[in-house]
Image (spheres, rainbow, N blue to C red):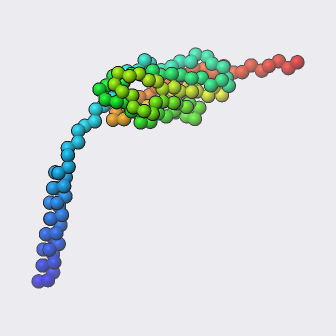
């Protein structure tokens, strides 16, 4: 008889906790879906053409917040250590323009294609910016 009473008390306790949890969830304010950002890019690909070896090259990508809420760039990352991005850390207000710069370390001669991935707050799809070109090999100086 004791076992039945304990089982009933445990069952009642679990049921009460379940109702309390549901009541707390119902009391929470409903959250609204965040507004996806809207950005207009002047270009998403930058072709350096031919650049000299050993001289870092900088590509600039201009953009405008065409949405109705502040735009936050939550992360910007280059595809390798030879491509270093810089970007605004503060929110960009609706209608305002800004830029992302990508500095490419032109250490190795030859053709290159690198990317910079831009993650926007409240957006499922990142934006991929591309830089490309050819690094011309340094010519050896004539020995006198």
- Counting every numbered tag in the picture gives 0
Residue 67, by quadrant, is top left
Residue sitting farthest toward the right: 144
Q: Position of residue 85 (x, y in %)?
A: 52, 30
Q: Quadrant of the N terminus?
A: bottom left
Residue sitting farthest toward the top: 49
Residue at the image position 45 percent from the left and 33 percent from the top: 89
Name the side, left or right, on which 107 lies relative to 42.
right
Residue 110 seen in this snapshot: no
Residue 6, by quadrant, is bottom left
78 relative to 64, above or below: below
Q: Position of residue 14 (x, y in %)?
A: 18, 66
**Residue 9 or residue 142, whichever sits in front:** 9
Q: Position of residue 106 (x, y in %)?
A: 63, 26
Residue 52 seen in this snapshot: yes
44 relative to 86, above or below: above
**Residue 118 or residue 26, whichever sits in front:** 26
Residue at the image position 44 percent from the left and 23 percent from the top: 98
Q: Position of residue 50 (x, y in %)?
A: 61, 16
Q: Quadrant of the C terminus?
A: top right
Residue at the image position 12 percent from the left and 79 percent from the top: 5
Residue sitting farthest toward the bottom: 1
Residue at the image position 16 percent from the left and 51 percent from the top: 26
């Amino acid at each position: 008889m004791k076992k039945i009473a304990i089982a009933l008390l445990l069952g009642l306790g679990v049921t009460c906790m379940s109702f309390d949890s549901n009541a707390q969830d119902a009391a929470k304010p409903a959250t609204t879906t965040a507004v996806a950002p809207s950005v207009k890019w002047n270009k998403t690909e930058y072709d350096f053409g031919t650049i000299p070896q050993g001289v870092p090259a900088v590509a600039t990508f201009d953009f405008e917040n065409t949405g109705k809420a502040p735009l936050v760039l939550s992360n910007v990352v280059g595809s390798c250590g030879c491509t270093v991005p810089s970007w605004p850390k503060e929110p960009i207000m609706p209608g305002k323009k800004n830029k992302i710069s990508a500095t490419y370390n032109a250490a190795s001669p030859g053709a290159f294609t690198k990317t910079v991935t831009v993650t926007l707050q409240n957006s499922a799809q990142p934006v991929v910016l591309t830089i490309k070109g050819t690094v011309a090999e340094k010519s050896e100086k004539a020995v006198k």
